[in-house]
Amino acid sequence: MAQFSHYTNKWRVYAYTTATGHSYTYRTTGSGTDLIEVNYDPARPGSARVGVSLLDTLVTIRARLPAGRVSLGLARRIFADG
């Protein structure tokens, strides 16, 4: 998880620490100071990207699909595959 650090111009800057104890920053646009999930390759920890949780993905999918069996079937398929 990355902790909000500060604003700079139009950027929000987050700080995160790798498993080896090295600190890095991640910049993104927008507003807000909530914690964000950052994914990175251990071989290149300075090139992180924001991760999206499975729950957030399912909520988004459900909001965009029509009500009924289609949504339930898709949710079952996602959980069965993942």
Image (cartoon, rainbow, N blue to C red):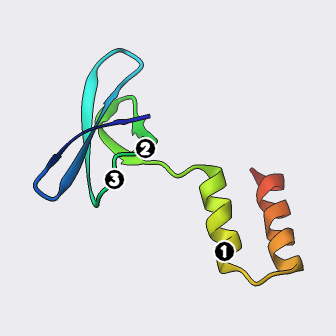
Name the one closer to the observer, 14 or 33: 33
Q: Amino acid at mark 3?
A: Gly
Residue 20 in the image: x percent, y percent?
Answer: 37, 15
- Label 1: which secondary element: helix
Q: Amino acid at mark 1?
A: Ala
| Residue located beneath label 1 in the image | 63
Toward the left, the furthest residue is 9
The first of marks 1 and 3 along the sequence is: 3
| Residue located beneath label 2 in the image | 36
Q: Is residue 81 above or below residue 61?
A: above
| Residue located beneath label 3 in the image | 32
From the viewer's perspective, tell me whether residue 21 is left or right of residue 60. left
Residue 59 in the image: x percent, y percent?
Answer: 66, 63
What residue sits 31% from the left and 34% below the top? 44
The numbered mark at residue 24 is: none
- Tell me the quarter of the picture where residue 23 sits: top left
